[in-house]
Image (spheres, rainbow, N blue to C red):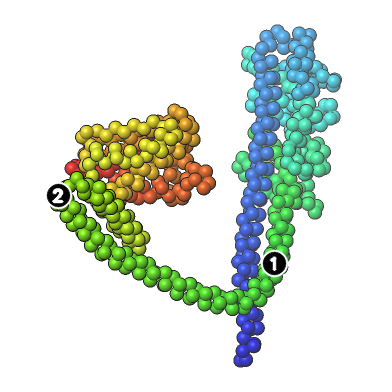
Amino acid sequence: MSTPSKPCEIHKLLLVSMILVPVIPLLLAAAVGFYAFSETTKSHATAALTQAAVDHRRMIDDFLKERRNDLESFLAMLPPEALTGEIARQEVRIMLQSGAAAFQDMGIINPEGAHTAYAGPYDLLGKDYRQTPWYMETLKKGYYVSDVFMGYRNVPHFVVAVVRRIDDRPWVLRATINSKVFEDIVNVVNIGDSGEAYILNAENRFQTGRRSGGDLLEKDPAQYPPQRGSLMTFTDTKGDESYLSVSAPLNDGKWRLIVRQKTSEAYHDTVVAAYTVLLCLICGGVMVVILAFMASRKLSESMQEKTEAVRKLESQLLQAARLAELGEMAAGFAHEINNPLQIMRADLALFDLTLKDIPEREEEKASRDELTEIAEQLQIQIGRCAAITREILRFGRQDAPQNQTIDLTEYLPKVWAMVENKASVHGIGLHCDVASNAPTVEADPGQLQQVMINLVNNAIHAVVDRHGSEGGEIAMRTRRDAKGNAVITVTDNGVGMSKEHLSKIFMPFFTTKAPGQGTGLGLSVCHSIIDSMGGELTAESTKGEGTTFTVVIPGRDAA
């Protein structure tokens, strides 16, 4: 295989791989996502329709129960002598008027089945109801809600009837429900544009009209599955249109409430999702092909760039190695410088002893003072050189903490004195209270100093942010706890912290200071230092009131 053909073959292989690798998961994810979404939307649509059916059934049941209760209450209040004659007709008329629009007419039927009192638009007074099904059912059950029927008036209607027995003789009060009012209650269902509700009897005849077609007493040609349970969901078809339906029993199971919605509307979100997924797949596929082509073409160029980057990295590694060697050399230089410094310090000490051994003479006092001053200056400069070499050595390696026995009654006031000037500049009052029985501790003096100064500096910032140059207070108190540990508290009356910030203050790089005023490392480092001493650093704060940091360090004689 010739060399020029290799990049071309690699490009083709990369192109195919970059297309197939994302496309296959994309197709799988789209299929799974669409299936899950469609099932969820169908479930939500069914749940919404079911809830509408439950609410509608409850509303219709309540309406019928209220009408029954109205009739029972009215019949129970009538004295026996008011069940016939003009008094009965007047009472029925009053009851009909009090029932507002719910009742169309009303009448009392005597024990012989005759209409003895009637109020309404039809000529029903004196009619004999003994052989009517609804009358016989009322006598059996004590109340009855009939199917829609034609009756004497030859108009579709249904009645609610109740019975009262006086001396074991049945008196029946029956009322015709206003069909328009009842249909308005049944038909009002808020489920999209195609949602509708209607009632069928056991013979599949409409007890209320249906918006999409179906008059009272007309038989519904649709074949519905038998009702099972209190709620039932199914799909029925009318011509070319399919409906998602929920049915519920009414009127002691004699009626069936149907609430339905066109499936095209109920599952509209699923259809939209299908088109959306298809559009996303097409757009995603086009983007994958374009990006794969561009990426595969650039990968060959990238390989050359990576090769150049490797060369640069090798150069940087070489430079890093040289810097490491330079660090080792600097440490060596520091060691070498320390040796003559030690000799100079020893000679200077000898010089100082010699100078003290020379007898003092008045005429040589000026020269002696000058030599003493020179010796002191040399001591200072040698100390500075030694400090510089120590810093170089410390930079070159990580020194282990130099633990010492620290008497806090002497140590802490000295540390406190280091920040007094800074605090006084901001008008902050400092208070240091170290108990006389404060225990001695084993710790690195420099690290402990770093912790205490950091806590005080943070307190100064918090106090200045709240009080400015007046009214700030910072107090440090030290005591011995019951276990012999040293407990150091640093309390300020600064701005305080919220609970959210308080939970994060010991996290690296978290700071409440303005950008550029803090790194977020101080408290994290302090926490690590105290933890390495076997102690504990905690904080308590109230927003707008102040903060208290508590440092617990094991005492030398701690239990």
Residue drawn at 36 percent across, 43 percent down: 453
State left or right for residue 389 relative to residue 512: left
Residue drawn at 70 percent across, 8 percent down: 81
Instruction: Report which residue position mark 1 lands on.
Output: 287
Q: Amino acid at mark 1?
A: Met
Distance of mark 1 from mark 2, alpha carbons? 99 Å
Quarter-of-image position of residue 156: top right
> Of the numbered discs in the image, which one, if any, rests on residue 359?
2
Quadrant including the C terminus:
top left
Q: Choose mark 1 or mark 2, whichever is in front.
A: 2
Residue drawn at 65 percent across, 14 percent down: 76
Q: Nearer the viewer, residue 169 or 402?
A: 402
Q: Amino acid at mark 2?
A: Pro
431, above or below 367, in the image: above
Residue drawn at 45 percent across, 72 percent down: 319
- Mark 1 nearby-residue class (10 Å; few <14, some 14–19, many ≥20): few
Position in image of residue 239 (x %, y %): 80, 52
> Of the numbered discs in the image, which one, if any, rests on residue 505?
none
Position in image of residue 504 (x %, y %): 44, 45
Per the image, label 1 sits on a secondary structure element best described as helix
16, above or below 410, in the image: below
Quarter-of-image position of residue 129: top right
Q: Nearer the viewer, residue 36 or 47?
A: 36
State left or right for residue 361 relative to residue 20: left
Q: Earlier in the sequence, mark 1 or mark 2?
A: 1
Does residue 350 show up?
A: yes
Labelled pair 1, 2 in contact (Cβ < 8 Å)? no
- Mark 2 nearby-residue class (10 Å; few <14, some 14–19, many ≥20): few
Q: Nearer the viewer, residue 366 or 231?
A: 366
Quadrant including the N terminus:
bottom right
Position in image of residue 498 (x %, y %): 47, 37
